[in-house]
Image (tube, rainbow, N blue to C red):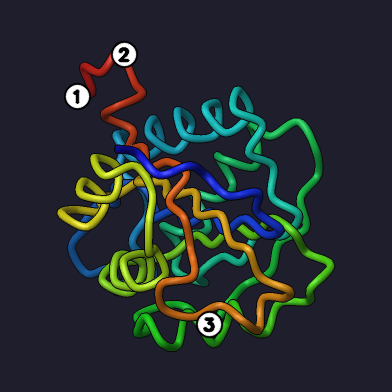
């Protein structure tokens, strides 16, 4: 039996940066998106618009591939979204939770554009429930361009902790693009 979704006070959207290139002599932090990554980021942005997943604030890793992912997603959104660089490059899941806890409570929908393994571990840590198939897929692999939408019944971001979230959905570019036939 699938559990009933909660009426969330807060929504956390976790987006792993899209597929990056590996050019010779380029530092990891400066790696750009690959062509496939640019297409995937656009697919995710279009999906977010179609599903009305509009963040109030986006916290974006300072790594180039995360910034480029956000730029393509932001280009698809129908409204201006405030964004900030966040210290989430190569951080642990606990550090990511600390960053989330510092968000002002008037921000109701928060988007984080970051990296694995911190993104995958944080999502798995936060999610207590949700569609069993989606939870299983998310915990098995949080691929580049993966998008987890987590609903939270909290009184403020400072309350986020392990097992406080409901996975409302988990999608990947492959599951969305070209009728599921992603390159």
Q: Quadrant of residue 22?
A: bottom left
Q: Residues within 10 Å of mark 3 (few under 14, many from 20)?
A: some
Measured as percent of width and height from the top left, residue 73 is found at: 57, 40
Q: Residue at x 44, y 38 (%)?
A: 41
| Dot 3: element | loop
The residue pinned by badge 3 equals 87
- Examine the rendered structure and indicate whether residue 173 appears above or below residue 88: above
Label 1: state its secondary structure.
loop
Numbered disc 2: secondary structure: helix
Residue 28 at x, y = what percent? Answer: 29, 72
Are the residues at dot 2 and dot 1 in contact (C-beta closer than 8 Å)? Answer: yes
Q: Where does residue 58 sit, x and y in percent of width and height?
A: 65, 59
Residue 67 screen position, x and y as percent:
53, 58
Mark earlier in primary sequence (2, 1): 2
Q: Which image quadrant for residue 99?
A: bottom right
Which mark sits nearer the N-terminus, 3 or 1?
A: 3
> Is residue 72 shown above or below 115?
above
Which label sits on residue 101?
A: none
- Position of residue 34 in the picture relative to residue 11 (left or right): left
How far apart marks 3 and 1 lie (CA) works out to 32 Å
Spatial CA span between label 2 and label 1:
9 Å
Of 24 and 59, the residue lying toward us: 59
Q: Which residue is disc 1 drawn over?
A: 183
Asked if marks 3 and 2 touch (Cβ < 8 Å), the reply is no
Mark 2 Cα within 10 Å, few/some/many (few <14, many 20+)?
few
The residue shown at (41%, 57%) is 65
* Quadrant for the N terminus in the image: top left
What residue is shown at x 33% (from left), y 33% (from top)? 173
Label 2 belongs to which residue? 178
Q: Nearer the viewer, residue 103 or 181?
A: 103
């Amino acid at each position: 039996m699938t559990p009933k979704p909660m009426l969330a006070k807060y929504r956390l959207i976790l987006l792993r940066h899209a597929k990056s290139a590996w050019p010779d002599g380029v530092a990891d932090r400066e790696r750009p998106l690959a062509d496939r990554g640019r297409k995937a980021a656009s697919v995710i942005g279009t999906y977010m618009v179609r599903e009305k997943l509009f963040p109030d604030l986006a916290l974006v890793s300072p790594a180039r591939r995360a910034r480029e992912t956000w730029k393509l997603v932001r280009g698809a959104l129908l409204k201006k979204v405030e964004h900030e660089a966040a210290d989430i490059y190569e951080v642990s899941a606990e550090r990511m939770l600390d960053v989330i806890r510092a968000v002002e409570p008037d921000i109701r929908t928060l988007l984080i554009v970051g990296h694995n393994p911190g993104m995958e571990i944080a999502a798995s840590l936060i999610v207590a429930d949700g569609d069993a198939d989606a939870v299983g897929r998310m915990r098995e692999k949080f691929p580049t361009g993966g998008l987890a939408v987590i609903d939270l019944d909290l009184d403020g971001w400072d309350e986020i902790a392990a097992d406080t979230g409901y996975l409302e959905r988990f999608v990947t570019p492959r599951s969305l693009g070209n009728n599921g036939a992603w390159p």
